[in-house]
Amino acid sequence: MQLVDPFHRPIEYVRLSVTDRCDLRCGYCMPKGFRDFEEPEDWLSFDEIERVMAAFGRLGVTRIRLTGGEPLVRKHLPQLAARLSALPGIEDLSLSTNATRLAKHAQALKAAGISRLNASLDSLRADRFKAITQGKLDKVINGLMAARDAGFQPIKINMVVMAGVNDDEVEDMVDFCIEHDFTLRFIETMPMGETGLSASRHYVDLRQVRKRLEQRFELLPGMMPGGGPARYVRVAGTELRIGFITPISQHFCETCNRVRLSVDGTLYLCLGQDDKFELRPLLRDGISDSELEDAIRHAVALKPERHEFSDKPEQIVRFMSVTGG
């Protein structure tokens, strides 16, 4: 029953967006003043989400990551998480968050069956954090500490490295993650829509970041559990793993194992292409479970071989918040 795309890649991972809304406005994700959100009646309901994820589970998907926007903006998210973690075949349920609401929800999310967290943190300087996100750094730090106290392991810190914005904080972020026993992942900017922080203007090749780190740290080969594309090293003498996510300088399309389901029920087959398949109309027209599985197979057959961020950087006009993490 394993889903396999036309290029013989098994699909075992769904990134599930539960909302396109967010309480921050990160300049590389969503334009300042953006208000063109999906209406709640167009969101998949929890029942519809559970039904689609159950179908994916029957087709061999084992990993689900809850994303947004900011997933904790969606009311009663721990209830949905509990339903998804109980689905047959689902072995790993994780969450991507900006951590602003984690202090309130960490215990409930852990009890619901979420085992791993990815948290976005692009600066450790309050004024710079506010300039990038329009938010407050102390809320994020408090959320991260609450998640650690709730027993989440690992907690992965995602830092989008941007030239002239925060690239001078790379070493500071390494020290922060060593101190608090977090995993660190650096991410290259991607051309997703026209936002306030231009990917071309602020792009940093992470191979250069790695060379910088090698001047201060001994970096050893490392591994981390998870279904994502990061290439990991370990800092000698510590438990810190550092991952490099390099969609531009060293794309990882040949091992892509995922699809993305947006809050309105659209399956996006590639982050850097427009190939998609809409499930919501089928669900609301009364599709059967077997027909739903056939629809998912048909959608996966549309998955392209690779993105074209480098060749056609202007191609994707939708924003990251719309696509879903």
Image: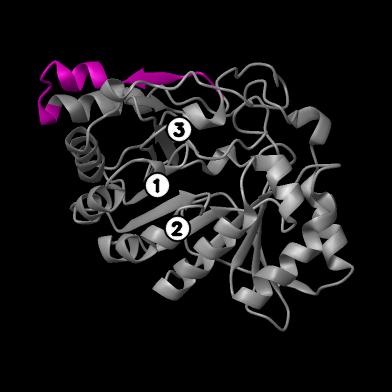
Check disc 2: other Cα within 10 Å, few if <14, some if 14-19, many if 20+.
many
Is 8 one of the magenta-colored residues? no
Q: Amino acid at mark 2?
A: Leu
Counting from the top left corner in percent of width and height, residue 302 is at 41, 21
Residue denoted by label 2: 102
The CA span between labels 2 and 3 is 16 Å
Indicate the quadrant containing the N terminus: top left, top right, bottom left or bottom right: top left
Q: Where 148 falls versus 58 (above or below)?
A: below
Counting from the top left corner in percent of width and height, residue 315 is at 64, 16
Asked if the residue at tag 1 contacts the one at tag 2, i.e. Cβ–Cβ closer than 8 Å, the answer is yes
Give the magenta-colored segment's residue range: 273-290
Residue denoted by label 1: 72
Residue denoted by label 3: 21
Residue at the image point whose x is 32% and y is 38% from the top: 3
Tag 1 or tag 2, which sits nearer the N-term? 1
Can residue 256 be seen here?
yes
Asked if the residue at tag 3 contacts the one at tag 2, i.e. Cβ–Cβ closer than 8 Å, the answer is no
